[in-house]
């Protein structure tokens, strides 16, 4: 571990100034509370990517933004999945509608650029929405010098076979390695067996396998961070003045324009809005938010 403190919210201003000077990369992490079987703490998706980002920043430099624990659920393909794997149990979700998240996300990128970061690595612990965050990031990057890579944690590896399966062997092993205090395999049987979105191969999980997968991912993230910094070009002329940043930043008005003119019109193309192959039964508790028409 080369760099000690990396969590933005826990650092003193002088520590942040020095970290930015050393390595102007910020990690933005997204997840939510969602059942991952009875044996994983519900915050898995968000906790996993946040801790992974902290490991990467400790080894390769950078700052990790406060974790964001609210993500897309209930709508589109989630309704069918939740009906089948969670059923009529309290899912303890911390979910928001997709357009709420993506508009907020634009502001997160804007703030990252405004604070002087040159590159951002955006990790979604909740799949398959890394793809949506990547689409929004691409649009943002046309208006800002900030270089952005966005995706889900399952992509940050040279061995994509070591993936797959909600709360299954791989995801559970990784979480076990990162947060041993929040995985309790004895609950798999005690919790009533394969309930609450249990992964099919969850019983093959191991902390040691997780350690290896984490190491691989940390190395991948370090390489990606260096790549993004090399791609960075300072803008020819500064944006609107921003405190402590001679390059300035996009204003709220400019950010709203990006939302209104470019992101909002393509929302229908995002994974979040995909229609499931078969709709859930009208009597299901997951039916009411499977589609939504009133949004802007
Ligand atoms: Zn997950």
Image (tube, grey):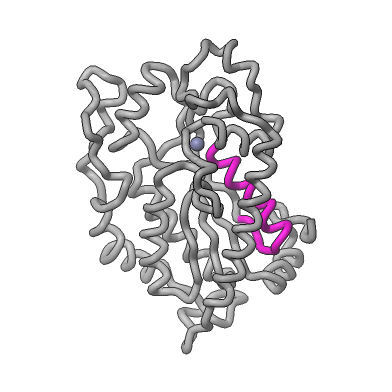
Tell me: residue 88, above or below residue 137: above
| First to last magenta residue range | 44-64
Answer whether residue 48 is magenta in the image.
yes
Comparing 96 with 229, the one in front is: 229
Tell me the residue at 60%/55% (across/down). 65
Location of the N terminus (image quadrant): bottom right
Tell me: residue 5, above or below residue 20: above
Residue 205 sits in quarter:
top right
Residue 144, x across and y down, in percent: 44, 74
Tell me the residue at 23%/17% (across/down). 283
Residue 38, x across and y down, in percent: 55, 20
- Residue 213 visible to the viewer: yes
Residue 263 sits in quarter:
bottom left
Answer whether residue 46 is magenta in the image.
yes
- Residue 30 visible to the viewer: no
Residue 110, x across and y down, in percent: 47, 66
Comparing 64 with 232, the one in front is: 232
Residue found at the far bottom of this picture: 236
Q: Main secondary structure of the magenta part?
A: helix
Tell me the residue at 66%/63% (across/down). 62
């Amino acid at each position: 571990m080369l760099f000690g403190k990396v969590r933005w919210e826990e650092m003193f201003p002088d520590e942040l100034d020095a970290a930015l000077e050393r390595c102007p990369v910020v990690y933005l992490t997204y997840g939510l509370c969602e059942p991952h079987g009875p044996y994983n703490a519900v915050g898995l998706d968000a906790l996993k990517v946040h801790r992974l980002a902290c490991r990467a920043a400790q080894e390769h430099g950078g700052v990790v933004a406060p974790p964001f624990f609210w993500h897309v659920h209930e709508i589109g393909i989630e309704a069918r999945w939740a009906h089948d794997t969670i059923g009529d149990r309290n899912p303890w979700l911390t979910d928001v509608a997709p357009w709420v998240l993506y508009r907020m996300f634009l502001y997160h990128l804007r703030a990252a650029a405004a604070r002087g970061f040159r590159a951002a690595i955006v990790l979604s612990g909740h799949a398959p929405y890394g793809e949506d965050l990547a689409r929004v990031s691409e649009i943002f990057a046309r208006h800002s010098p900030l270089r952005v890579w966005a995706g889900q944690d399952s992509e940050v590896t040279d061995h994509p076979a070591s993936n797959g399966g909600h709360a299954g062997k791989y995801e559970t092993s990784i979480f076990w390695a990162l947060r041993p205090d929040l995985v309790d395999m004895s609950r798999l049987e005690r919790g009533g067996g394969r309930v609450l979105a249990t992964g099919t191969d969850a019983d093959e999980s191991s902390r040691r396998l997780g350690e290896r997968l984490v190491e691989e991912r940390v190395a991948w993230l370090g390489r990606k961070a260096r790549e993004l910094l090399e791609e960075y070009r300072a803008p020819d002329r500064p944006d609107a003045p921003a405190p402590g940043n001679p390059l300035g930043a996009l204003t709220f008005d400019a950010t709203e324009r990006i939302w209104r003119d470019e992101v909002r019109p393509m929302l229908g193309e995002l994974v979040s809005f995909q229609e499931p192959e078969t709709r859930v039964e009208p009597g299901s508790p997951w039916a009411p938010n499977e589609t939504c028409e009133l949004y802007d």
